[in-house]
Image (cartoon, rainbow, N blue to C red):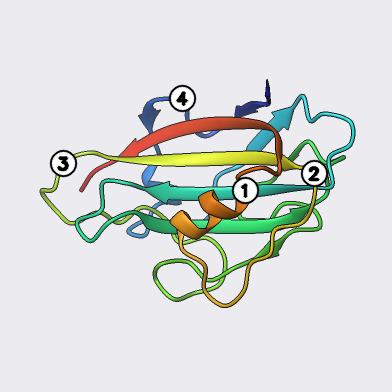
Amino acid sequence: MTGIEFTSAAFGDRTAIPRHHSGEGDDVSPPLTWSGVPEGTSELVLLCEDPDAPSGTFLHWLVTGIDPRSTGTAEGEPPPGGQEWPNGFGRMGWGGPMPPPGHGAHRYFFRLWALSEALPLHGRPTADAVHHAVKGRELASGTLMGTYQR
């Protein structure tokens, strides 16, 4: 599987996500940029998850149906053509980092997949359900990891 170059102008890989993008800040999604989407991609899927949450992996953002010709998304905007899904807070779209105070730095994995076909998701999918649904459909992927602590 090939790799997608996946970055943010707001933070670097394995660095702190600015408070502005967190649940205790302005709670706006960070700007994201990608390249290297392979020919034959049906859709892009974006997932942001926190595997360090006390109750298990927490879903912060899920967007499906992203235009495979797109190259990114602006701060506070869903990716072009994308359908946002409910996050772990029960709201549609982005829900910024908000780990428990004193819990240490949490890792936030932004994952972008180029898929050969649309994902069969319904209701309120979990991060694990997305990972399971992507299997066998991925043509390429990219990962960006940021950290946040309170």
Question: Residue 88's x, y, as percent?
Answer: 41, 67
Query: What is the C-alpha distance between the residues marked 3 and 1?
Result: 30 Å
Quadrant where the N terminus lies? top right
Between disc 1 and disc 4, whose residue precedes? 4
Q: Is residue 110 above or below residue 13?
A: below
Q: Secondary structure at mark 1?
A: helix
Q: Nearer the viewer, mark 3 or mark 1?
A: 1
Q: Nearer the viewer, mark 1 or mark 4?
A: 1
Q: In the image shown, does 30 or 106 lie closer to the viewer?
A: 106
Q: Is residue 145 above or below residue 62?
A: above
Q: Nearer the viewer, mark 2 or mark 4?
A: 2
Query: What is the C-alpha distance between the residues marked 2 and 1?
Result: 10 Å
Q: Secondary structure at mark 3?
A: loop
Within 10 Å of the Cα at label 4, are there few (<14), some (14-19), or many (20+) other Cα atoms?
A: some
- Residue behind mark 4: 13
Q: Is residue 80 left or right of residue 150?
A: right
Q: Are marks 3 and 1 in contact (CB under 8 Å)?
A: no
The numbered disc on residue 134 is 1
